[in-house]
Amino acid sequence: MEAWAQLILDFLNEVVGQPTVLIGNSVGSLACVIAASESNQNLVQGLVLLNCAGGMNNKAIVDDWRIKLLLPLLWLVDFLLKQPIIASSIFERVKQRDSIKKILLSIYGNKEAVDEELVEIIRGPANDEGALDAFVSIVTGPPGPNPVTLMPRISIRVLVLWGDRDPFTPLDGPVGKYFSSLPSKFSNVSLQVLEGVGHCPHDDKPDLVHDRLLPWLAQLVA
């Protein structure tokens, strides 16, 4: 996670060269949070978080009863993925079109958004060299910095958008509850809950996201 955040900061420094609003989804949101917490307003002007992840993987979420129930299974998966032959077999199953489509349908509120083009966009990188190693590293590696410790460091304006049908980071889970509580603690944070939207709001219902995002951006730069 830290490497991704540093890539963002390097890009802002070397390419953009002016204050920028960072927008991320899921672990992309977390990378933006890490980058913003290590930057200043000369680089990062604002932050938009769409269903922010609590970590690279579920090891970051230790106080959710759902995760506690799954911990033995998660440990088993970690063990199996460290066996190269087994890891390769699991990855081959996961990256099949049908598997990807089932996962996407489970996290999208708008099922019509899950088309063949989206499946291929997700599936494409899985065929790249090093994809298996990346998959294993993401699932079994450290979760990275926790947003709970990072958000209090951020003084720039933050817009949190959250789909209320997200099974990965549900509003009633520890990560969702934490971000839902932020507007009452920090005046720079605002929250908009998106009804009928899953884990990827920007693609699930982009018009709804734009309705919340564009006025906020207009106020930010006014």
Image (cartoon, rainbow, N blue to C red):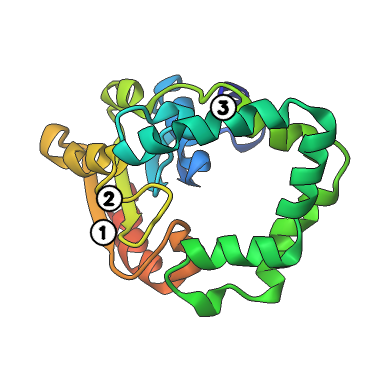
Amino acid type, label 2: Leu
Amino acid type, label 3: Met
Q: Residue at x 42, y 32 (%)?
A: 33
Q: Nearer the viewer, residue 193 or 187?
A: 193
Residue 42 visible:
no
Quarter of the N terminus within the rendering: top right
What is the C-alpha distance between the residues marked 2 and 3?
23 Å
N-term mark: 1 or 3: 3
Residue sticking out furthest to the right: 129
Residue sticking out furthest to the left: 184
Identify residue for label 2: 171
Amino acid type, label 1: Val
Task: Please indicate whether residue 205 sits to the left or right of residue 86 in the image.
Answer: left
Q: Residue at x 31, y 63 (%)?
A: 212
Identify residue for label 1: 193
Find out whether the residues at labels 1 and 2 contact each other: C-beta distance under 8 Å: yes
N-term mark: 2 or 3: 3
Within 10 angstroms of label 2, few (less than 14), some, or many (20 or more) residues?
Answer: many
Q: Mark on residue 1?
A: 3
